[in-house]
Image (cartoon, rainbow, N blue to C red):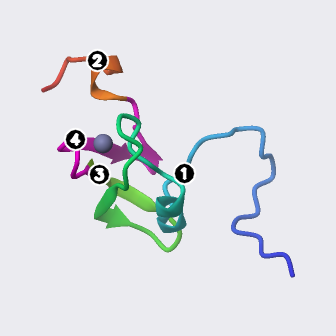
Amino acid sequence: MITYVSAEPKSSRREVIMKKEMMDILACPVCKGKLELSVEEENEKEVVRGSLRCPRCDQRYPIADTIPNLLPPDKRDNTQT
Ligand SMILES: [Zn+2]
């Protein structure tokens, strides 16, 4: 049985959408450890806003508009601290 998560007319765009099942494959980019998800806003399918936290590195990775930002802190813009 095939389950279609979403029926998009074009699937040319490949972005990582933050779904809860993504937690199984997401890992901290620094230590590859497990991340903790905290949800601020979600819809039926995705986490819209929130953050992923690595307890080992004590580092937070923001989720904005369903896109998780898993760049290591030193590769990010340091415009906001
Ligand atoms: Zn880590």
User: CA gap, disc 3 to disc 2?
Assistant: 17 Å
Q: Position of residue 19 (x, y in %)?
A: 51, 62
Q: Amino acid at mark 4?
A: Cys
**Which quarter of the image is occupied by the C terminus?**
top left
Residue 77, numbered label: 2
Q: Is mark 1 within 8 Å of ligand 1?
A: no
Residue 17, numbered label: 1
Q: Earlier in the sequence, mark 3 or mark 2?
A: 3
Q: Amino acid at mark 2?
A: Asp
Q: Which residue corresponds to the image point at 38% horizontal and 66% vertical from the top-left? A: 42
Q: Residues within 10 Å of mark 1 (few under 14, many from 20)?
A: some
Tell me the residue that label 4 is attached to: 57
Which stretch is magenta? 54-71
Q: Amino acid at mark 3?
A: Ser
Q: Is residue 79 above or below residue 2?
A: above
Q: Is mark 1 in CB contact (under 8 Å) with mark 2?
A: no
- For the residue labelled by badge 3, is the local secondary structure a helix, a strand or a loop? strand
Q: Earlier in the sequence, mark 4 or mark 3?
A: 3
Residue 51, numbered label: 3
Q: Is mark 4 within 8 Å of ligand 1?
A: yes
Q: Is residue 76 above or below residue 65?
A: above
Q: Amino acid at mark 1?
A: Ile
Ligand 1 located in image quadrant: top left
Q: Is mark 3 within 8 Å of ligand 1?
A: no
| Residue that lies at the very extreme toward the left in this rendered image | 81
